[in-house]
Amino acid sequence: MTMQDKLARLAELEKQARAGGGEKRIQQQHAKGKLTARERIDLLLDPGSFDELDHFIIHRATEFGLAEQKYLGDSVVAGSGKIDGRIVFIYSQDFTVFGGTISEVSAQKICKVMDLAVRKGAPIIAIWDSGGARIQEGVMSLYGVGEILLRNTWYSGVIPQLSVVVGPSAGGAVYSPAITDFVFMVKGISQMYITGPDVIKAVISIDISHEELGGTKTHAEKSGVAHFIAENEPECLQMVRRLLSFLPQNNRDNLPTVTPTDDPARTDENLLNIIPEEPKKSYDMKQIITSVVDNGDFMEVHRNFAPNLIVGFGRLDGKPVGIVAQQPAYMAGIIDIKASVKGARFVRFCDAFNIPLVSFVDVPGFMPGPKQEEGGIIRHGAKFIYAYAESTVPKVTVITRKAYGGAYIVMSSKHLRGDINYAWPTAEIAVMGPEGAVNIIFKQAIAKADNPDETRQELVSEYKERFANPYIAAARGYIDDVIDPRLTRPKLIRALETLENPSDSTRPQKKHGNIPL
């Protein structure tokens, strides 16, 4: 056989590999409004940058007629490429081949690119469109899923791991996205569940649709599994590219700094008018965040889950920061179970990848009530405390209005080793709000008064004058400065400059702590 013959054979095999499960199944994929595995990779990566691995591999199973059904590359497309010129590793499950199910060899492909990603120190992106473990392969497919989950765990906090769910993700396969750092879903085509509707109907006699059970609304608003929701696949993949622009390549890499186009000394007169005169009136904290970050560019994470807490990424003078803030416009910004879990997870991610944290605080406390207590608000709230207290990245805090009780402490206070803590003149720092404090402290005096309501109002006014301001905390060094709101942006930028490259030699040596999971 001549070289030309060999090259012709190579070209034919490559064509077969690119064809996946064949033209008919590709058409079926398109008919569902879904892209193919390769189309997704081409949309996500810089043009012409994809370098594929293992596209000639085939499964080894012989039972249940699989010996006659073999496809080059099996059920996953894997390799490396670039996003904005930076190396990433990627695998994309091919639903046209056995429904994208995970076989022994497809798992080996996935594990290979995961291992290469860690050796290189580059993010790994998983595109999920799979029915889970391949039933026909039995324990060998379970072995494959287990090997993937092991690497997800080992490599957590070492390289960013992103999961893009653009089809079904069922059974053991859902746990891989759940371990990764961020999960993206697309309305109408993405579902995640441990067991599908058919099994649920058979076992517990409940009829439920795929969308109700594990669609975007369920996981974006209720379970919190999904961090980002897109209207369609191209939008979703652009969101992945945008997120990566804020993240380092690995836990030892420098942050991706961009040339700033927003004046670091810029002030904003509008910040004087955001906090309402009436202390119980709501406002939108996102107005403050977008006013302060570079060019108003803020990428919110978990937007639909626990909206009483805001988390996301922005830049200050071209450098990425993670932002955690209460949202007074929703549930007064109170911290409940969902907000605790959301905040703790985000803080720990930023700490793992050396992204400084900026916290904006307007918090009335932790959510009271029997449902919260039964649901474990103590345990879940402790996760939030633990995450802030354990973090070693630079932490700068701005108290915009109220900061009461344990919720004041958790939000990167000096007492949990917040580095620089600012307050606006509108800030109130106390164990609880003035009305509640007066009702407890002066309960008997109010009851004996000739005019209890008038006496109560006088005591509330006195309490506000004496305690509901930031200057008592500033006098004790718990607040580093009370600042003009208009100066928030330049103050934050200068504070972060002073905190660059911190060293931490004061913490006790240990293998790891026991976070209250």
Image: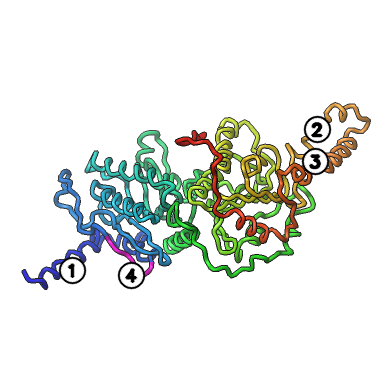
Q: Nearer the viewer, mark 4 or mark 2?
A: 4
Q: Which mark, residue 48?
A: 4
x and y percent of residue 486 in the render? 73, 61
x and y percent of residue 501 in the render? 54, 53
Q: Amino acid at mark 2?
A: Asn
| Earlier-in-chain disc, 4 versus 2 | 4
Q: Give the residue displayed 58% in from the left and 39% down from the top.
A: 385
Q: Circle 4 sits in a helix, a strand or a loop, which is it?
A: loop
Q: Give the residue displayed 56% in from the left and 50% down from the top.
A: 502
CA–CA distance in space, label 4 to label 3: 63 Å
CA–CA distance in space, label 3 to label 1: 78 Å
| Earlier-in-chain disc, 1 versus 4 | 1
Q: Are marks 1 and 4 in contact (CB under 8 Å)?
A: no
Residue that extends furthest to the right in the rendered view of this protein: 450
**In the rendered image, which residue does mark 1 sit on?**
11
The answer to which quarter of the image holds residue 368 is top right
x and y percent of residue 132 in the render? 32, 46
| Earlier-in-chain disc, 3 versus 2 | 2
**In the rendered image, which residue does mark 3 sit on?**
467
What is the span of residues highlighted in magenta in the rendered image? 46-52
In terms of depth relative to the viewer, which is nearer, 516 or 458?
516
Q: Amino acid at mark 4?
A: Gly
